[in-house]
Image (tube, rainbow, N blue to C red):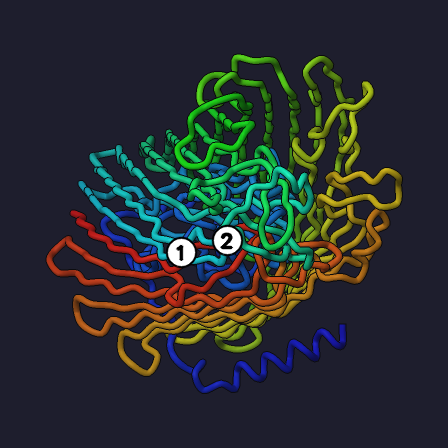
Amino acid sequence: MNALSLGFCTIALAVSASPLLATDEPTATTLAPVTVHASDIMVMETPAVHVRVTRVQLQRQNVTESADALKYAPNMMVRKRYIGDPNAVISGRNAGTLQSARSLVYADGLLLSNLMTNGWDGAPRWGMVAPEEIGAVDILYGPYSALYPGNSMGTTVLIHTVLPQRFTASVSTQFFNQDYRDAYGAGGHYNGHQAAATLGDKRGRFSWLLEYSRLDNHGQPMQYATARVGGNAAVAVPVNGAVPDRNPNGSPRLVYGANSIEHTVQDQAKLKVGVDLTEHTAALFTVGWWHNRAEDRTRSLIRDAAGNPVAGGVISADGQTWTLPASGLAPSSANDTHLLYGAELNGHLDNDWRWTIVASHYDFHRSQAATANLAEPGVPSGGPGTIADKAGSGWDTVDLRSSGPLGDRHMLYAGVHGDRYVLDSRVRNAGDWRGHADGAQVSAFAGRTQTRALYLQDVWSFADAWALTLGGRLEQWRAYGGLRANAVDTLHYADRRRTDFSPKAALNWDLADGWELRLAYGKAVRYPTVTELFQGSLSGNAIVNNNPALKPERDQSTDITLTRHLEHGHWRVSLYQDRIADSLYSQTDITVSPTVTSVQNIDKMRSRGIEGELGLTDVGLDGLDLSASLAFNRAKTLEDRQYPLANGKTFPRIPKVRASVFADYRFAPQWDASLGIRHSGRQYGTLDNSDHVDSYGAVSRFTVADAKLRWKFAPGWTAALGVDNLTNERYWVYHPYAGRTWFGELRWEL
């Protein structure tokens, strides 16, 4: 602790000595004629590092989806690979982009996080919130509040939407063009557009907002088809266009095609109705609808001597013989319809106590993913394949919360929480993968998890400059209804139940005018998801390649933060550490023969770091606002008995450095320009850190710049021109990120 304190003091003194930081803090912005709805009670007083992104700040950025609100958040990133990406996973202090269950995203208290799984496919359902309806976003770091479940061990995102206070309407349209380049011959321009509209009003006790948007975008290739060495040289077809390459581990490979070139069309609609039932009681009802139609086409990059594309068989290239896998260029498609239902009742009493009841239901009404068995480059022609169906999956949540003063020095928070996650996944054969699943069942797995929780948290202002927060969360978790099936057999898992208590504590000291020091501790228990528990395979009348007895992740987290509040700005420095037992991650158990690859518990991992944040307005020039952040992370695997090659190595997908700078300059009454820079340092994609080549499949370091110019050319009218990845940097998160993307935007609002 002495070394930790010394490091903290050194950095705090260095930051406080900077003359740049002696400027002003951003002034509050009034969101007229709308009000921000915040169902989370007194968010600002939760004992955690807290960052707010306002509606005004979002308007200064290039925003196409609600996930873009986190683009410049300190020590965070969202793995958004292209516009319309449904798998945009959050990565934070202690979580990589394959650990989606270590974050929580709420919109007006309604859960958007997909906690049925933990991985690339567990991204929050960003499509249920349109950027036009966002009033503010609060980001909480770490598991220091008893109000939230153990998934808050990473990051908690609270999206607050707006409700109109008078008649309001808006229409906007965006056009985007991506200039994508690669080393394999699949570069080019990928275009898209988006249109959105809102309409709302407040009459008497009723307020309502109706919102609709449509996104139509063509993304760059997400994957590349590779060939393996070998085959019958006598029948090999000589080809041109194949590119010799190395995978991230340095092994040679041949790239011959591009996969997952996605054309996505997404429709989203939402209706919110607010009712003032009495002077002290109000209700909010929400219905959301999201529909996605996506086609992932493939493209052969090689040609025979006659100039015809080649998609299969044995080829001769680069002086060797190669065999192309039959499904290497197999296309796929997705068809999804999701529904969100939410209801909230809240009020306050004459003694200043407040209460809230929030219930939600998220329904995978339709969820089909179809894949061809054989290569079909170009325009798909149809043929045998498989169709995976998750219809009927989803989750339910309910929260009862109250807060209020106990005397002059205590603020008490109390609540009850319940949730249930249902996952049913079925895969069937199809005579034509573009049609119906008319064949036999290939596989299936299903299961349920359920959590019940009680929490209590007290903020005790025991002296004028001191506050002590003590709390705890008691959780009872249950997993049941698990099954695994193949074409002929169905096996069931045993039910499980577990109870845990997670204490929380924080000490705040206002050590001087404008200075705040806080030490926080929190334990979090993150329970296994349905997919982690029950997804596996059948072999010899037994379930293999999974472990239904997985232990939950248990995090012991500590944060010490110094904050300086200025007249028109602030800065913050935080030191943090997470010690996580039984971390859940997919790995290979090399202590058994044959080896088994599955989700397993890693005995001990640790993530620690230092994080700085700065926010200023009118920096040197009137109208110039600046925000910046810098974080140094050190995440390590301390003990992994099943894969000892990982011991002492950097934990995957958590970069050693994260940094961002965003500046906006209002250089004329109707004009403003912004520039943002995002940096992510060295990181690894493997537990043993064996990946050292920055190629397809790697997890890159990167620095990208974004810019935007806005012009309010008439009352209610705004035009904008923007660009992301200005220098057209090529970088990867296994898949390639987008290249230089230009944005054009026109917006009208009443």
Q: Secondary structure at mark 1?
A: strand
In the image, is residue 41 above or below residue 212?
Answer: below
Rendered residue at 66%/55% (across/down): 252
Q: Of 196 and 592, which appears nearest the observer?
A: 592
Q: In the image, 79: left or right of 119?
A: left
Q: Which residue is mark 2?
A: 736
- Classify the position of the N terminus by image quarter: bottom right
Q: In the image, 89: left or right of 457?
A: left
Bin the neighbour count of mark 2 within 10 Å (Cα to Cα): few under 14, some 14-19, many 20 and up: many
Q: Secondary structure at mark 2?
A: strand
Q: Of 682 and 580, which appears nearest the observer?
A: 682
Res. 180 mark? 1
x and y percentages locating residue 503 in the rendered image = 71, 49
Rendered residue at 33%/55% (across/down): 55
Dot placed on the residue nearer the N-terminal end, 2 or 1: 1
Q: Is residue 144 visible?
A: no
Tell me whether the residue at label 2 lies in contact with that at label 1, contact meaning CB atoms closer than 8 angstroms.
Answer: yes
x and y percentages locating residue 489 in the rendered image = 73, 14
Name the amino acid type tagged 1.
Answer: Tyr
Rendered residue at 73%/27% (across/down): 537
x and y percentages locating residue 577 in the rendered image = 69, 62
Res. 307 mark? none
Per the model, the C-alpha gap separating discs 2 and 1 is: 10 Å
Q: Is residue 72 visible?
A: yes
Q: In the image, 201: left or right of 350?
A: left
Rendered residue at 68%/66% (across/down): 634
Name the amino acid type tagged 2.
Answer: Pro
- The image quadrant of residue 428 is top right
In the image, is residue 363 above or below residue 746?
Answer: above
